[in-house]
Amino acid sequence: MKKDMTKLGITLMLYASIACASLAVVYAFTKESIDNQSEIQLQASLKELFPEATVFEPIQDISSPDPNIKFESAFEVKSDSAALGLAVQATGPSYGGNATLLVGVDLHRSIAGVRVMALNDTPGLGMNASNPTYYVDKTNKVTFLGQFEGKFLTDPFEVKKDVVAITAATISSASLTNIIKAVGDAAIAYMDQKAMAAPAEGGTPAEGAVPAEGGTSAEASANIGAQPQAGGK
Amino acid sequence: MSMKKLYSIFRQGIIFENPLLMLMIGLCSAIAVTSNVSNGIGMGLAMTFVLLFSEIIISLFRKLIPSMIRIPIFIIVIAAFTTMVDLVMKAYFPDLSKSMGVFIPLIVVNCIIMGRVEAFASKQNLPSVIADALGMGLGYTWVLIGISAVRELLGNGTLAGIQIMPASYQPILFFILPPGGFFVFSLFTSFNIWLKKRMEVSARNKELAAKKEAA
């Protein structure tokens, strides 16, 4: 019996090792393409949100006000040297696991646009968040994420009040709205910190576009970290 | 192994032993992803691929698999192929992979594959196993495409994302929701049973006629 068990164990191990080895080969072959896909997707979406932008400068000192929502990457969007706004790739819990959105914020402190980076949800229901032909407003052809375009960061962002939910996917709608809201709150804090504002008629906020020096960045993140207590109700 | 025998194994899966409509296995994926046609096609093909290769491997190694640990080995083989499909889809068909979400990884626990591997592939030789996998895969795929076409057309007014119904058509949301899935599925089942009965009757009549002629 004991001998049997060892033999069975070794057999099982052999099968598992072969399976692992072949998976490793497939993984190695597809990894580059998968990474490329998400990078291509990110770059394309950034360009879509800010068609005039020439530079997407990665920034570190912006942090999420909600512990459940993580910022994967953040960019200061510039056209040559003039700032255009911020773009943040944020991941948060949704109905079918984590969802990743790319949220663009312009200097008027309104949402420039939202794109889906990754979403696991029920096909035909929550998945409609990334469906370009699913309209929450059929007459004006506005998609679920499209309705956020131009929305001010100080708006309440509440589903069924100022945000139209996807039919039969209220939880998904609320979760995605929360992610966008988190980015909005963080963006307000970041813009206050860096004194970023829409250019007044004639003048350009030259200092606003220049990132703060090393010394102040720790202070900046501390300030933003303090934001959730104030803004998080 | 004659071609005729292989063909008779192949056609079993399509109507007489259709995995979804007659054997009633693997239903969760069939109802969950069938809210639009492209999902139906993608899921059907992914599942057929995994079924075919798992059955081939299990059949080739069937004498080297101790029966006491056959289930864990089956799962290892199926999971390996499923993960490959998942990776390849993510790499080369990102849109499809995105819309299928979690249901590709879930092929691992699809009872159709487990059932066919256990009941068929672990006892049969390679040619019949290939015929069985293709038949079962096709049986699964046509039902998925059929259900998803009905659900998408009535529930959303489109087919594979293309608007078919006139703009004035008010989509019947019921068909996209899970209850609509069950409803359409039961219609397909009744149709399949009716078809099967009819084919059996006509086969018997033919036999009787042949006997009469001989007498």
Image (tube, rainbow, N blue to C red):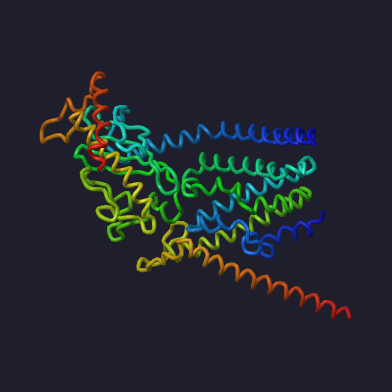
Which residue is the extreme one toward the left?
A202
Residue A16: x %, y % from top left: 67, 35
On the rendered structure, is B4 left or right of A222? Answer: right
Looking at the image, which residue is at 33% across and 42% down?
Answer: A179
Place of residue A39 in the rendered image (x, y in percent of width and height, measured from the top left):
42, 34
Front-most of residues B17 and A134: B17
Q: Position of residue B26 (x, y in %)?
A: 60, 56
- The residue located at (29%, 36%) in the rendering is A65
Looking at the rendered image, the quarter that the N terminus of chain A falls into is top right
Q: Is residue A52 left or right of residue B193?
A: left
Q: Residue at x 26, y 19 (%)?
A: A214
Count of numbered circles on the image: 0
Q: Is residue A20 above or below residue B212?
A: above
Most extreme residue toward the top is: A215
Farthest residue in the right direction? B215
Q: From this view, report whether residue A218 is shown above or below residue B182.
A: above
Q: Residue visible at 68% across and 33% down? A: A18
Question: Who is closer to the viewer here, B147 or A189?
Answer: A189
Quarter of the image that includes the C terminus of chain A: top left
Q: Between A13 and B4, which is closer to the camera in this rendering?
A: A13
Q: Is residue A147 above or below residue A34?
A: below
Q: In which quarter of the view is residue A49 placed? A: top left
The picture places residue A59, in percent across and down from the top left corner, at 31, 28
